[in-house]
């Protein structure tokens, strides 16, 4: 009971790693073991016989935090975001992973994917084909595929940059061949 009281008293200052009693470098298997250990120790059903309602409420709160910690730390994206949050200067305000934090994580992941490849499957397909053509030196084909990618995602900066690179190479080749691509005799 003394340990329970001590943990409940510090609950608002503990991050999820401390709640589960694991290192920040803990593997997913270690996190799972820690969750099962802590949830067995602090499951509200173990304390149903107690008469003190305040102690029961503290046990419920601790159990909720143990469960919350597990669900955040077992998800790689949430864990990365959470670790960055609790390692930063605003640690005290970021100890709990809220819906807003989760929304930020989802939005950041979505932005990262969009920045890397694009949002439209057809656009991504044409971009990847165009990039492969450019890598192989098939400049005209690369230009066609990148223009097609831009028809699906006209605002995609990455597609525009790649197209500009390809068109620059095509223009240089055209100049080498005599201006507009045709040799004059």
Image (cartoon, grey):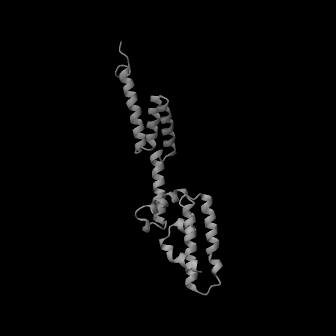
Image location of residue 159, percent across then percent down: 43, 40
Q: Nearer the viewer, residue 34 or 97?
A: 34
Q: Which residue is pictured at 40% across the width and 34% down the height? A: 165
Q: Nearer the viewer, residue 44 or 10?
A: 10
Image location of residue 138, percent across then percent down: 48, 28
Residue 87 in the image: above or below residue 50: above
Quadrant of the snapshot with the N terminus: bottom right
Image location of residue 164, percent across then percent down: 38, 35
Image location of residue 86, percent across then percent down: 46, 63
Residue 165 in the image: above or below residue 174: below
Q: Quadrant of residue 171?
A: top left
Residue 69 in the image: above or below residue 115: below
Quadrant of the snapshot with the C terminus: top left
Q: Which residue is pictured at 50% across the width and 57% down the height? A: 80
Pick out the residue farthest to the left: 179
Q: Which residue is pictured at 65% across the width and 72% down the height? A: 40
Residue 183 in the image: above or below residue 88: above
Q: Nearer the viewer, residue 63 or 29?
A: 29
Q: Which residue is pictured at 43% across the width and 65% down the height? A: 91
Q: Quadrant of residue 146?
A: top left
Pick out the residue farthest to the top: 185
How many numbered callouts? 0
Pick out the residue farthest to the front: 2
Q: Nearer the viewer, residue 99 or 36?
A: 36
């Amino acid at each position: 009971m003394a340990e329970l009281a001590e943990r409940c008293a510090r609950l608002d200052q503990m991050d999820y790693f401390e709640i589960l009693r694991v290192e920040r470098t803990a593997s997913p298997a270690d996190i799972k073991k820690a969750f099962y250990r802590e949830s067995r120790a602090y499951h509200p059903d173990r304390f149903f016989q107690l008469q003190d309602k305040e102690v029961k409420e503290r046990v419920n709160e601790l159990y909720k935090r143990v469960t919350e910690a597990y669900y955040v730390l077992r998800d790689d994206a949430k864990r990365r975001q959470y670790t960055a949050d609790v390692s930063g200067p605003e640690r005290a305000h970021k100890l709990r992973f809220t819906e807003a934090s989760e929304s930020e994580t989802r939005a950041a992941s979505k932005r990262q994917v969009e920045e890397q490849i694009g949002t439209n499957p057809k656009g991504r397909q044409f971009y990847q084909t165009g990039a492969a053509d450019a890598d192989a030196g098939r400049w005209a084909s690369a230009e066609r595929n990148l223009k097609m990618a831009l028809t699906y995602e006209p605002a995609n900066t990455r597609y525009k940059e790649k197209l500009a690179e390809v068109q620059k190479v095509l223009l240089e080749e055209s100049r080498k061949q005599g201006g507009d691509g045709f040799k004059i005799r």
